[in-house]
Image (cartoon, rainbow, N blue to C red):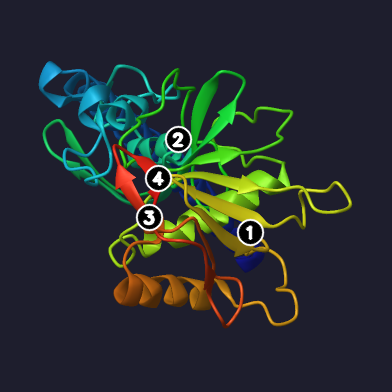
């Protein structure tokens, strides 16, 4: 008769052997499953890359620029928007992170203030919605003119000539010594001050009949332009005395930029265009103005 302890030992050994065999079987099955999954994923990646490389899914970089630009944007703006050095000329719409790459490329463009949205349109179109920086003036530096926005940010390459029409943007007379890179703000405070005035004038362009040819930040008594008075010059030669920079606190009694604009609008409603006078001073509550002139071929002739 076999002792019970020996029988129990044999039973435990058989049970252990059974668990080992089950573990081996599970490991084999798991390995096969992982191999099959890996193979399927590999084939999926290969298939996806093949599909992504098909010509019908290739996006042309030139098609990224929105078709409908603001009314003020000319062909030059469209061409400069197409300068996206971080993107290849053609790329697949199925490339990982393609929308983020397109958004970053436009964010680095000086004309773009904000990328509103980037959306895929299969098979090979990407729709981009942008908010633009609008030029408000031109800065003369050296022998070239550079467009700037209301913050004094350089937007464009240099223009060798400036439009001479009465509806063109004003030119900033400045003392800048360094030319910033495209997309950077001029470090000179007189350029920033003039740009801020130009932005205010542009925002009220529909209400003010007079157009301005130059914005000059004059030198004050201490030889500084930082706090010097700003002078607006019309195409007919009228001098409009604006006063201190909108970026500084007003002098005692001096009007705010909005109040100055209001004075200019009411003056024209009552007495005609600002450009019909030798000078107009809108710095304070009482508007002072010079003699009225008659305009002949853009030249001011006194009555």
**Label at residue 109:** 2
Q: Is the C-beta separation of discs 4 and 2 under 8 Å?
A: no
Counting residues from the start of the chain, the first of labels 2 and 3 encountered is 2
The x, y position of residue 65, in whole percent, is 25, 34
Quarter that holds the C terminus:
bottom left
**Residue holding disc 4:** 300
Q: Residues within 10 Å of mark 4 (few under 14, many from 20)?
A: some
Q: Is the C-beta separation of discs 3 and 1 under 8 Å?
A: no
Q: Residue 111's image quarter?
A: top left
Is residue 228 something that shows in the picture?
yes
In this rendering, the label closer to the viewer, 2 or 3: 3
In this rendering, the label closer to the viewer, 2 or 1: 2
Counting residues from the start of the chain, the first of labels 4 and 1 encountered is 1
* Mark 2 residue element: loop
* Mark 3 residue element: loop
In this rendering, the label closer to the viewer, 4 or 1: 4
**Rendered position, 233 above or below 44:** below
Residue occupying the point 34% across, 72% down: 271
The x, y position of residue 80, in whole percent, is 36, 26
**Residue holding disc 3:** 303
Query: Label 4 to label 3, Cα distance in Å?
Result: 10 Å
* Mark 4 residue element: strand
Q: Nearer the viewer, residue 121 or 156?
A: 156
Is residue 134 something that shows in the picture?
no
In this rendering, the label closer to the viewer, 3 or 1: 3
Counting residues from the start of the chain, the first of labels 3 and 1 encountered is 1
The x, y position of residue 260, in whole percent, is 51, 73
Counting residues from the start of the chain, the first of labels 2 and 1 encountered is 1
**Residue holding disc 1:** 6
The x, y position of residue 225, in whole percent, is 76, 48
Query: Label 4 to label 1, Cα distance in Å?
Result: 126 Å
Query: Label 2 to label 3, Cα distance in Å?
Result: 51 Å
């Amino acid at each position: 008769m076999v002792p019970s302890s020996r029988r129990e030992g044999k039973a435990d050994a058989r049970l252990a052997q059974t668990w080992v065999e089950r573990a081996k079987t599970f490991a084999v099955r798991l390995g096969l499953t992982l191999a099959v999954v890996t193979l399927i994923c590999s084939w999926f990646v290969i298939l996806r890359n093949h599909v992504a490389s098909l010509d019908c899914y290739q996006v042309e970089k030139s098609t990224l620029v929105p078709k409908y630009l603001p009314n003020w944007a000319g062909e030059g703006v469209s061409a400069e928007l197409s300068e996206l050095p971080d993107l290849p000329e053609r790329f697949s719409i199925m490339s990982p992170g393609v929308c983020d790459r397109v958004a970053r490329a436009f964010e680095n463009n000086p004309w773009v203030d904000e990328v509103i949205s980037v959306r895929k349109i299969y098979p090979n179109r990407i729709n981009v919605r942008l908010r633009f920086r609008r030029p408000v003036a031109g800065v003369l530096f050296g022998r070239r003119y550079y467009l700037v926005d209301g913050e004094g940010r350089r937007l464009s390459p240099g223009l060798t000539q400036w439009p001479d029409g009465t509806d063109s943007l004003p030119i900033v007379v400045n003392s800048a010594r360094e030319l910033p890179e495209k997309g950077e703000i001029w470090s000179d405070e007189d350029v920033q001050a003039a740009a801020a005035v130009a932005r205010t004038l542009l925002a009220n362009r529909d209400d003010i009949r007079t157009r301005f040819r130059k914005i000059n930040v004059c030198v004050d008594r201490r030889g500084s332009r930082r706090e010097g008075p700003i002078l607006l010059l019309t195409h007919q030669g009228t001098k409009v005395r604006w006063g201190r920079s909108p970026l500084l606190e007003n002098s005692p009694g001096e009007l705010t930029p909005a109040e100055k604009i209001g004075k200019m609008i009411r003056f024209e409603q009552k007495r005609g265009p600002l450009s019909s006078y030798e000078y107009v001073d809108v710095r304070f509550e009482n508007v002072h103005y010079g003699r009225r002139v008659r305009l002949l071929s853009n030249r001011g002739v006194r009555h």
